[in-house]
Image (cartoon, rainbow, N blue to C red):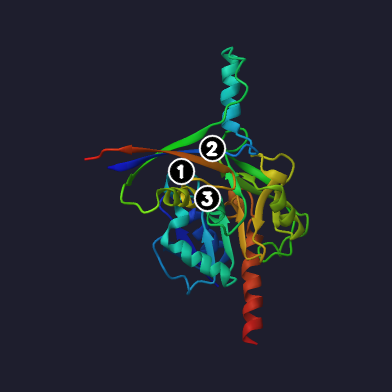
Amino acid sequence: MKFAVIVFPGSNCDVDMYHAVKDILGEEVEYVDHNVTDLDMFDGILLPGGFSYGDYLRTGALARFSNVMDEVVKAAEAGKPILGVCNGFQILLEADLLPGAMRRNDNLKFMCRPVELRVENNKSMFTSEYESGEVITVPIAHGEGNYYCDDETLDRLQANNQIVFTYNGTNPNGSIADIAGITNERGNVLGMMPHPERAVEELLGSADGMKLFQSIVKNWRLSANVVTS
Amino acid sequence: MSYKVKVYVTLRESVLDPQGSAVMGSLHKLNYQEVKDVRIGKYMELLIDKSVKDLDKSVMEICEKLLANTVIEDYRYEVEEVVTQ
């Protein structure tokens, strides 16, 4: 499986993402510049964390108009797995690939520490290797992770099982319904504030993020087999 | 001649403003108990060429596409005519 790590001006978790896929997961991966206008050769798209365009105006607001984003939208429509972590999640929200918006953390602090997440939906292509209700430890590092959506949208997220991860115990940012990560309705676009790519080996304090990447690859192989057989 | 468009972007009434709450707390500590609410927003000035066909349409599009995130923010604007070199 071949992954693209999209690099925006100001991305800073692109190397972590690349390392997780290449060295730990053992799959193909390439850095892709934000001006690239063709993602056809990639099977999965990763939007890394960081401060694209310096977070000017709003987090993710300017990156959303990068040339590559038209291709990301196309890939989403084609059903390819798309994972946005932290600033990547913020970009997916601004691009309307996911519903809702991000606010400053309710305590106004940049929160940087490991947190516990609860796997709310293990039926998604990103979480099938986890147990339902499994509690995992993954680090967060953000100042704007306070997810917001209106009541109607929240009802829809809950009804469609689009809330994939919630914060277990203490909510670090004030997000609505303790949301840490959501998918689109189709289930092939995941945005999450915590960093699974920073939890891929015990040396980093946790390897709990690994199953997320393994889920993507396993489900891609399954669907690829179905298509070819 | 150009238009100077002053755009104000604020969080929607229904959305909590943690920055505004923190500033209000400080104002209360300074003994300005009369302050009942603080909302923090953004102010932007656009200089737009007078040849624009439909100023309101352009400005509203600009605000909705980029300057404001209408999921959580409202915007309003004022227009001034200015002489530019």
Query: What percent of the width, then of the height, locates residue A154?
Result: 71, 51
What residue would you read off at disc 2?
Answer: B10
* Residue depth check, mark 3 versus mark 2: number of the one nearer the observer: 2
Q: Is residue B6 left or right of residue A89?
A: left
Image disc number at residue A229: none
Identify the residue at the far top of this view.
B31
Residues A20 and B82: in front is: B82
Task: Assign a secondary structure to mark 2.
Answer: strand
Find disc 3 in the rendering and name its residue: A87
Give the mark count. Answer: 3
For the residue pair A97 and A127, the one nearer the viewer reads as A97
Residue B50 appears in the picture as rendered: yes
Query: How far apart in space, not on screen, are marks 3 and 2 (Cα)?
Result: 22 Å
Q: Quadrant of residue B11?
A: top right
Task: Tell me the residue at 41%/62% (across/down).
Answer: A67
Which of the 4 quarters of the picture holds residue A191? bottom right
Q: Are marks 3 and 2 in contact (CB under 8 Å)?
A: no
Mark 3 or mark 1: whose residue is earlier in sequence = 1
Residue at (52, 58) in percent of width and height: A47
| Tag 3 secondary structure | helix
| Residue under pointer 1 | A57
Check if mark 3 and mark 1 are on a common chain. yes
Which of the two discs, 2 and 1, sits closer to the camera?
Answer: 2
Determine the residue positioned at 46% across, 52% down: B61
Question: What kind of residue is marked 3?
Answer: Asn
For badge 1, the amino acid type reads: Leu
Query: As drawn, is A121 to the left or to the right of B72?
Result: right
Which chain letter matches label 1? A
- Give the CA distance from mark 3 to mark 1: 14 Å
Camera sees residue A27: no
